[in-house]
Amino acid sequence: MPTTGTRDVAVVAFAQSPHVRRLDDRNEVELVMPVLHEVKQRLGIDQSAIDFTCSGSTDYLAGAAFSFVQALDGVGAWPPISESHVEADGAWALYEAWVKIQTGQADTALVYSYGKSSPGSLRDVLSRQLDPYHQAPLWPDSIALAALQARACIDAGVTTTQEMAEIAVRSRRAAAANPFALLQSSADADVLLQEPELAAPLRRHDCPPITDGAAAIVLAAGDRARELVERPAWIDGVDHRTDPHSIGVRDLTASASTRLAGERAGADRGGFDIAELHAPFTHQEVIVRRALGLNGSTDVNPSGGPLAANPMMAAGLIRIGEAATRIMAGDAERAVAHATSGPCLQQNLVCVLQGEN
């Protein structure tokens, strides 16, 4: 049975910042505050209408312990709020908020996440996600690990460098219609394949851009959702799973956790108009598509996806927001959103969204 819950819960508003390579003139509070104001203004509400607030971020990027406490200044100190935080992408904060609403302790929830990747070496920072005893001391950076996975996929016949380049082309051409995207390009795959390799077989176009940005979503239950917006994007199912921590004991050419989360969320029923997949590297999109059983009739990453803008701790939440926006606008009836965290697609969340039945 899919993980659907007993209460109908919907995304009723989504906002995000313009995503940039480097944001020097604003701190995290100043980055988050406009997004939080915008998402509530879309609904004509203020913080007093929010029953629960949950954020996603990481102290490793902020460079300070309990950095999310400072970011709460962007929410506002009054009225007093019921608040929580996850040291993860905002998609996992959304899951916690969904559970909170399922318990009946809230009817509305504000979810937000943010990340400034530019101040330090993101490739090295992400190595701290690894097993602290055997792998992290070797300092393998995130691109090197993704390259190992890409090579395994190519050797196993899962993908090719040509297909990977075509994914980059499609994603960055789609981003031309997204005013929030960082990278937009019209280069052909053959041109991209002439680029030098960063870490064989990955080239620059295969990798996500360093990005600073933030995003926010408002969830609401049942009739409250219908009061707030004409066409809510209902969460038909949501689930998250994780693969083993050690990358040496799992098949890097597949994503068992994505497949299982997808089955539990009801993604195996298919019928998706669009899919927003948090696949930071080109070959990972192939893995996730296969794990979710997506076919050619599904429009994948019409926003450009994480290859066009990849703000750490927010890119997964943005995938849910982008999918929900198209449902609320009437441009899609059924969508699947995916978020990931950790090296080589270690942790994965799948959210199925549906228009009004």
Image: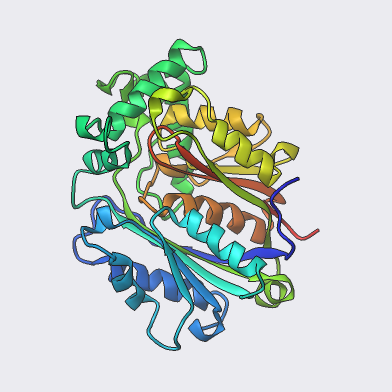
Say if 178 sits above or below 345 in the image. Answer: below
Tell whether 223 sits left or right of 97. Answer: right
* The C terminus, quarter of image: bottom right
Residue 181 x, y percent position in the rendering: 40, 50
> 218 or 260, which lies in front?
260
Q: Which residue is most to the front?
A: 133
Q: Where is residue 137, by image quadrant?
A: top left
Q: Where is residue 132, by image quadrant?
A: top left
> 221 or 130, which lies in front?
130
Q: Which residue is most to the bottom?
A: 79
* The N terminus, quarter of image: top right
Residue placed at 33% from the left, 67% from the top? 68
Say if 227 sits above or below 58 in the image. Answer: below
Q: Is residue 232 in sight in this rendering? A: no
Tell whether 28 sits left or right of 322. Answer: left
Q: Is residue 334 in sight in this rendering? A: yes
| Count of numbered badges drawn on the protein | 0
Residue 347 x, y percent position in the rendering: 47, 41
Give the colour scheme shown: rainbow
> 112 or 195, which lies in front?
112
Tell whether 322 sits left or right of 132. Answer: right
Residue placed at 71% from the left, 37% from the top? 268
Q: Which residue is most to the right?
A: 357
Residue 121 x, y percent position in the rendering: 19, 43
Residue 226 x, y percent position in the rendering: 72, 73
Residue placed at 60% from the left, 56% from the top? 324
Residue placed at 41% from the left, 69% from the top? 35
